[in-house]
Image: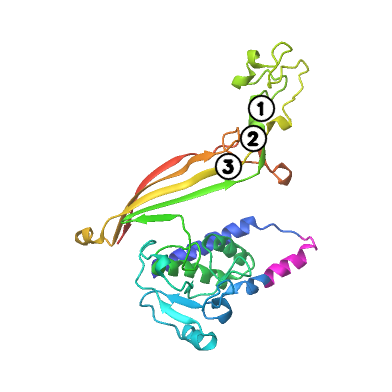
Amino acid sequence: MVKRKLYLSIFILLAHSFSALAQEKTSAPGLGPIRQYIATGWDTLTRSMTDCTSVVDPKIKVHPVLYLPAGFPVPPAVEKLHSDCSVEIQHLPKPIQQLGEIDTNAIHPHGLLYLPNKYVVPGGRFNEMYGWDSYFIIIGLLREGRTDLARGMVENFFFEIENYGALLNATFSKVATSFVTYGNFTLSFMFQGTQGAKKYGQTLAFLWGGLGDMKNATTAEAVPENLWTPEHETNNPAWSNTGKNYNLSSRYVYDASYVKLKNISIAYRIPTSMLEKIKVSHLEVYVSSQNLFSITPYKGYDAEVENGGNASQQGLEFGGIPNPRTYTAGVRIGL
């Protein structure tokens, strides 16, 4: 419990610091109505597992069901849901230590998973607490001074880990995740990408001769025998004699669409029966890799990287360091 409170405090502190750094001070009067709309929106998008309007989901055309962790005592406020709005209260069939221990397809009917604290959803027709969206929601809550609501959402994260085995993508019992479990092995992965983006590759432009005249070019295409001449027409421009810089051209605007395997990890959990003698409750070995590969037509080093200094330079890449491909091996131990 002490560690949990410590982690919670650290998370809130870091998120609040990030929020403070990201906040831009402005006196523009036109932002007043927008900020007021955002401030009132938090309450509109707040959900609670003790509120009939949160549990009776309009997207689901079946009788509403709320699932509690196996063996978890039913709070009085949850019991009241049954009489107030005919919500069926059920327990999951067994305790969950990690994802994959329960076949969600075997749970009928599907319903919401219980969380003890209020939380904010990313849209009006959502009633589930979403993992990735919740991080940014918490940042926004801290900027608005809604610390108690942000703290409750972080407490919900801990509740998910302790009772559902992981931070969930969503708290609906039928979810798709990037985890595949077989026996004691767990494979997790995350793909990232974008479609239709354009990027000005100024690094490539400078490789063609950033100081003008094309004579500082360092690409293989720019060797004299590959340049355009009347007798040898190519797509590679010839050297000029003007001394002017001709590399600021749409020639260097490229399709920056990409799909990247951002992270992949495989872990093996040592069976509990083998850990009794060494008094360890959990032991897992894993290997992982980041930025393992990407598929892209972009001719630069990394379609994901851009370093424009302001709003007018978005989509510019000049001397950006590509994301490195890394490999990691480690051990996770629980005492």
| Identity of the residue furthest to the right in this view | 29
Name the residue tied to disc 3: 258
Range of residues picked out in magenta = 27-40
User: Which amino acid is tagged 3?
Assistant: Tyr
Determine whether label 1 and label 2 are within 8 Å by CB.
yes
Per the image, label 3 sits on a secondary structure element best described as: strand
Q: Residue at x 64, y 35 (%)?
A: 318
Q: Is residue 31 magenta?
A: yes
**Residue at position x 48%, y 77% from top?**
65
Mark linked to residue 318: 2
Percent x, y of residue 270: 27, 55
Q: Are marks 3 and 2 in contact (CB under 8 Å)?
A: no
**Helix, strand, or loop for circle 2?**
loop
Q: Is the residue marked by circle 2 packed among few (<14), some (14-19), or many (20+) residues within 10 Å? A: some
Tell me if mark 1 has few (under 14), some (14-19) or many (20+) residues whose alpha carbon lies within 10 angstroms of its own.
Answer: many
The local secondary structure at tag 1 comes to helix
Q: Quadrant of the C terminus?
A: bottom left
| Numbered mark located on residue 165 in the image | none
Kind of residue sitting beneath label 2 = Phe
The earlier-in-sequence mark between 1 and 3 is 1
Give the spatial CA distance, label 1 vs label 3.
Answer: 23 Å
Residue in the picture at 60% in, 33% down: 300
Q: Residue furthest top?
A: 231
Mark 1 or mark 2: whose residue is earlier in sequence: 1
Residue type pointed to by label 1: Phe
Name the image quarter holding the N terminus: bottom left
Residue 278 horizontal side relative to residue 41, left or right? left
Mark pair 1, 2: CA separation: 9 Å
- In this rendering, is residue 158 above or below 253? below
Residue occupied by mark 1:
206
